[in-house]
Amino acid sequence: MREERTDARDTLESLAAGEIDVSEAESRLSGYVTTDAGRFDSDREQRRGIPEAVLAEGKRPAEAAALATTALESTGRALVTRTNPDHAAAVRDAVGEIAPDATVEVDETTRTVVAHAEGYERPELDATVAVVAAGTADAPVAGEAALVAREVGATVDRLGDVGVANLDRLLDQVERIREADVVVVAAGREGALPTVVAGLVAAPVIALPVSTGYGEGGEGAAALSGALQSCTVLTTVNVDAGFVAGAQAGLIARAIDGA
């Protein structure tokens, strides 16, 4: 209790001296920061080992930008997912206003925006996550998973277009995939690739069903069912849940690094 009071006093003294702003002070004292757009969980990475992300989908551009700048101010990093061009532009402009020296990475394919404050150092883990995509249509969701695993601190190795429609495309990459400590496999249509990969490697495999396909079983339904019924051992996340797959892979990477 005494240590907590000392930390609180140090925070208040830093605020009074102008060394930190109100958002940073609130983050240190409560673990979250309150904005008009909602409360940002600034303590998530310390508590869970994965960064808090701003889901832009369903938010107005100004709301996504406000939460992104709050994230940058309180943690040194902002990770925004499921953006559209208006979200991305609003976040870029808002970050530029409060932190002109910050780096901003906009990826239209994965619909993500990542900003790092000047001097921010991303965690580094001694573990590799392979992110494997069956086809080009699966790349956006696979890319989201890769980005999140990277931000957790893992080394990420991305492989694309190795779907089972031509098994040779996968077989000539098997040794490379086997070098990874954990594997995320994104596939739509019938979703066979995660099961096949899981039967060929020793590392944990996370199946990431993607919402591609036609008619019956389309929009990821068949891919999800196939992964849930896999005859080889793997873990399955929801359809298009790239953030979840990347975060889970990152947590496994953290455990490996810690060991």
Image (cartoon, rainbow, N blue to C red):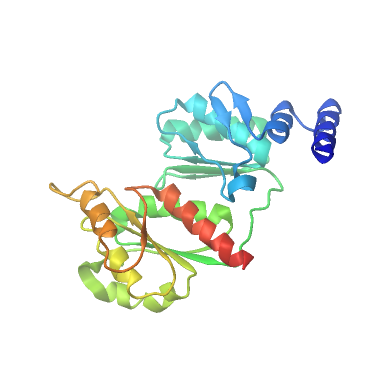
Where, by quadrant of the figure, is residue 7 drawn?
Answer: top right
User: Which residue, as the protein is rendered here, is positioned at the far front?
Assistant: 1
The reply to whether residue 196 is in sight is yes
Q: Write down the quadrant of residue 169 in the picture.
A: bottom left
Q: Residue at x 25, y 60 (%)?
A: 229
Q: Is residue 175 left or right of residue 70?
A: left
Residue 39: image quadrant is top right
Relative vertical location of residue 163 with respect to residue 179 in this rendering, above or below? above
Q: Residue furthest left?
A: 216
Is residue 93 in sight in this rendering? no
Residue 127 location, x and y as percent? 56, 67
Q: Residue 145 location, x and y as percent? A: 44, 53
Residue at x-position 72% and y-position 48%: 119
Q: Residue 257: x percent and y percent?
A: 61, 66
The N terminus: image quadrant: top right
From the viewer's perspective, is residue 251 above or below residue 100?
Answer: below
At which x and y percent is residue 136? Answer: 31, 57
**How many badges with numbers are in the image?**
0
Q: Considering only vertical position in the picture, is 218 above or below 127?
A: above
Front residue of 64 and 222: 222
**In which quadrant is the C terminus drawn?**
bottom right
